[in-house]
Amino acid sequence: MSTFDTRDLRAAFGSFLTGVTVVTARGEDGVPVGFTANSFTSVSLEPPLLLVCPGRFLSSFDAFKNCRHFAVSVLAEGQENVSNTFASFKGDRFARVEIDCDLHDIPVIRGAAAVFSCETAQVLNAGDHALLMGEVRDFRHSGAQGLGYAGGKYFSLGLEQRAASAPRKGLENIASAIIENDGAVFLLRDGASYALPQVVVERRGLLRDALGARLHALGLDVELAQVYSIYDRAEVGEHHTCFRAAYRKGTSTEGHFVPINQLAEMIFSVPGQSATLKRYAMEHQTGQFGLYVGDVDGGDIHYH
Ligand SMILES: Cc1cc2nc3c(=O)[nH]c(=O)nc-3n(C[C@H](O)[C@H](O)[C@H](O)COP(=O)(O)O)c2cc1C
């Protein structure tokens, strides 16, 4: 028996960025089974081998342990719902998503970034999981960006990259940060109102560096995370990129942490920040944070 704290070990494993797959097979009765897995690994090109690790806790564990064939669908950006369905829905998972059948008549996920159809090569016991190794008999890939997963959350690299690198001719680039610590967000006092810390950036490629330097100058040591909101204020020639950030240490005399449940009532001096922080307060309750792309009046929220 190890003396590790299992939750802590899980969190440490979770710092490894992965994609997300759905692994499917048929039970002995022919009924399809499937689960979401990020334990997918490519193993060998010659022969073509891959590996996934089904947990013993899966209701479908016996089906996977004994299957002759199985398939791995690598989920594409935007397929978070498919991942959630195959991770937690308890009814007929296949009725809720669009599927095709592969050469072994195993259902696979339509729109996946890649699909591998396998013949089982080896099954090994491995603690509370098993190693299910398959020899690839057929595969396809669409060139779509894969859905990302890190630290228990989805991310969409392609979407962020496209939005953050879109040319904004003539607009001034402004980067801001929602720095969270213990249920509160750091705000600067701006007279009678409040503002997120922000900085004007010379070149779009330098957004993170410039914002990091600004926050450092304020006395705050933070870890900048994903982009949360991208919007134009064309009337004043500004293009805003707002990042989520985690507080590490430091104090600033220019502002303070405000509890997230008070954000909806605060007055902000920068138009756009009020709506951004209202959404942040709402999404904080569920832990599902989207990416807003638009302008001050309207836009789309993409959920990672
Ligand atoms: C992103 C993600 C990755 C996962 N990876 C694995 C995995 O590699 N192996 C596994 O056994 N379960 C994994 N799970 C959990 C299973 O998907 C989940 O326990 C399973 O669908 C439950 O199925 P059941 O209700 O049929 O037992 C993962 C879940 C998520 C959200």
Image (cartoon, rainbow, N blue to C red):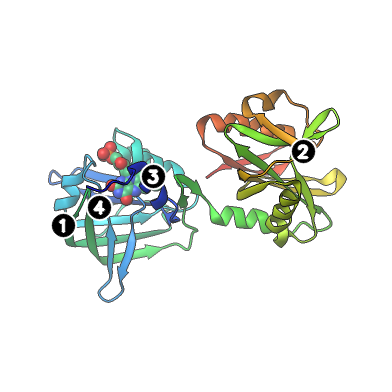
The answer to which of marks 4 and 2 sits earlier in the sequence is 4
The answer to which of marks 2 and 1 sits earlier in the sequence is 1
Residue 1 seen: yes
* Picture coordinates of residue 129, whole percent (x, y): 23, 50
Identified by mark 3, the residue type is: Asp
Residue 108 seen: no
Q: Work out whether residue 300 or residue 184 is closer to the camera in this orientation and state it.
A: 184
Q: Work out whether residue 198 or residue 103 is closer to the camera in this orientation and state it.
A: 198
What residue lies at 16% left-to-right and 51% top-to-bottom? 65
Q: Which of labels 4 and 1 is toward the front?
A: 1
Asked which secondary structure carries label 3, the reply is: helix
Q: Which of labels 3 and 4 is toward the front?
A: 3
Say which residue label 2 marks: 253
Q: CA distance from mark 3 to mark 4?
A: 36 Å
The answer to which of marks 4 and 1 sits earlier in the sequence is 1
Q: Residues within 10 Å of mark 4 (few under 14, many from 20)?
A: many
The answer to which of marks 2 and 3 sits earlier in the sequence is 3
Say which residue label 4 marks: 106
Say which residue label 1 marks: 68
Q: Which of labels 2 and 1 is toward the front?
A: 2
Q: Are marks 2 and 3 in contact (CB under 8 Å)?
A: no
Quadrant containing ligand 1 reads top left
Rendering quarter of residue 166: bottom right
Say which residue label 3 marks: 8
The residue at label 2 has a CB less than 8 Å from ligand 1:
no
